Amino acid sequence: MAGVDMSKRLRDAVIQDDVKALQGAKGFKDYIALRPEAKISTLCDLEEKMRLAQEAEIQAKALYRSASDAAQKLEWEFHNAVLSMKKSVLAQYGADANEIEAIGYTRKSDRKRPQRQTAATATLRRS
């Protein structure tokens, strides 16, 4: 028999079925658990701990999303400011200045000019 993979989350439907089963078992007047983990009091404690952990997870996810949104907003603000700075440098120094290379652009004079192809060279490159 294959073991149960406890590294994966249970589906919500399974958890809801377990909660309903516990609620039903709470109504038994003569229930005696033969195993300590099957006692109603133990199950109620575990259910409460599970709910608290789920609430903590939801709160942590909300904090994460909030921090992620704030970081994303600031990343875009920084990126747009850098683009503005690059345009300003280009306008101030011109397209062929050394300062253009310092900000990551290629100087106009360093760009490779397109080469004219002869008919023979074009045929060789296609094959």
Image (cartoon, helix red, strand yellow):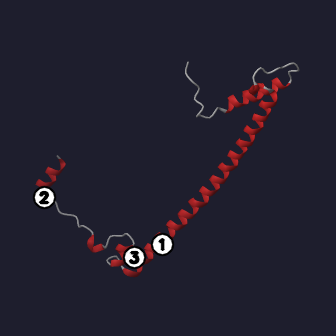
**Outermost left residue:** 120
Q: What's the residue type where badge 2 is placed? A: Thr
Residue 49 image position (x, y, % from top left): 75, 39
CA gap, disc 1 and disc 3: 10 Å
Residue at the spot x=14%, y=50% of the render? 124
> What is the crowding at mark 2: few (fewer than 14 residues within 10 Å), some, or many (at least 20)?
few
> What is the crowding at mark 1: few (fewer than 14 residues within 10 Å), some, or many (at least 20)?
few
Residue 26 image position (x, y, % from top left): 84, 26
Q: Secondary structure at mark 3?
A: helix
Which of the two residues, 97 or 11, is positioned nearer the viewer here? 11
Which of disc 1 and disc 2 is earlier in sequence?
Answer: 1
Q: Secondary structure at mark 2?
A: loop
Residue 23 image position (x, y, % from top left): 81, 27
Q: For mark 2, what is the residue?
A: 118
Circles 2 and 1, Cβ within 8 Å, touching? The answer is no
Q: What's the residue type where badge 3 is placed? A: Leu
Which of disc 2 and disc 3 is earlier in sequence?
Answer: 3
CA gap, disc 2 and disc 1: 42 Å
Residue 104 vertical position relative to residue 3 in the rendered view, above or below: below
Instruction: Describe residue 95's horizontal placement relative to residue 75 as left or right.
Output: left
Q: Secondary structure at mark 1?
A: helix
Q: For mark 1, what is the residue?
A: 84
Which of disc 3 and disc 1 is earlier in sequence?
Answer: 1
Q: For mark 3, what is the residue?
A: 90
Circles 3 and 2, Cβ within 8 Å, touching? The answer is no
